[in-house]
Image: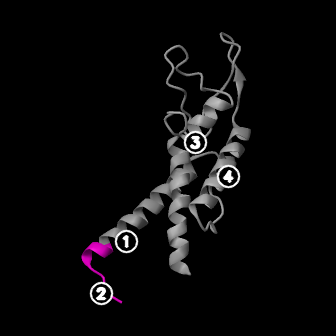
Amino acid sequence: MAARTPKDDRIRQLEDELFVARQAVFHLIDPRAREILTGPFDLDSRADVHEWFTNAVEEVLQIADAMIDQDTAEERAICPLCRESAQNYRLPDQGFKFPEGLRRHLLGSHKSTQCRVSLVALNEAIDSIARFDQLR
C-alpha cells in the first residue's frame, strides 16, 4: 500500500468537511423531510440511487403544503425542502405548480433548477456507494 501524501490527506479532509456540511443541511430541514432524505445506506449502484431518489421525491410531495391560488385556481406549493418558489414573475412567492412543477424542481428535470436540498441528498447517496465499497 502506498504511503499517504499531503494531497491524500487534504482530499480526505475536504471529504470529511463535505459530509459534515451535508449533515448540517439535513438538520436544518423539516424532520419529516430529513427522515425521507436520509435514506438507506446499502445502495449498491447508481440505478439503486436513482430508484431511491425517485421514491424519495414522491414522498416529499406527500408532505408539501399545497394550496389553491386564488388568482389562477391552480394548486401550488412552496418546496418543503428549500422553501423556494418557481421563478415566475407573475407569482414570485406562490410556490410551484403542484404536483408536477414541484416534482420537476425536486428532480431538476425539464430544465428546472433543482432544489439545492434534494441535490445534496442525491449527491450524498451517490457518494455513499463509494464509501460502502471501501468498507467491503
| Residue to which mark 3 is pinned | 107
The magenta stretch spans residue 116: no
Q: Could you classify mark 2 by the number of other residues whose Cα lies within 10 Å: few (under 14), some (14-19), or many (20 or more)?
A: few
Name the amino acid, label 4.
Answer: Ile
Q: Are marks 2 and 3 in contact (CB under 8 Å)?
A: no
Name the amino acid, label 2.
Answer: Ala
Q: Earlier in the sequence, mark 3 or mark 4?
A: 4
The magenta stretch spans residue 3: yes
Local SS, label 4 = helix
| Residue to which mark 1 is pinned | 12
Q: Report x, y in % for residue 58.
A: 70, 43
Local SS, label 3 = helix
| Residue to which mark 4 is pinned | 36
Name the amino acid, label 1.
Answer: Arg
Local SS, label 2 = loop
Residue at figure coordinates x 66%, y 12% from the top left: 72
Q: Could you classify mark 3 by the number of other residues whose Cα lies within 10 Å: few (under 14), some (14-19), or many (20 or more)?
A: some
Q: Is residue 27 above or below residue 87?
A: below
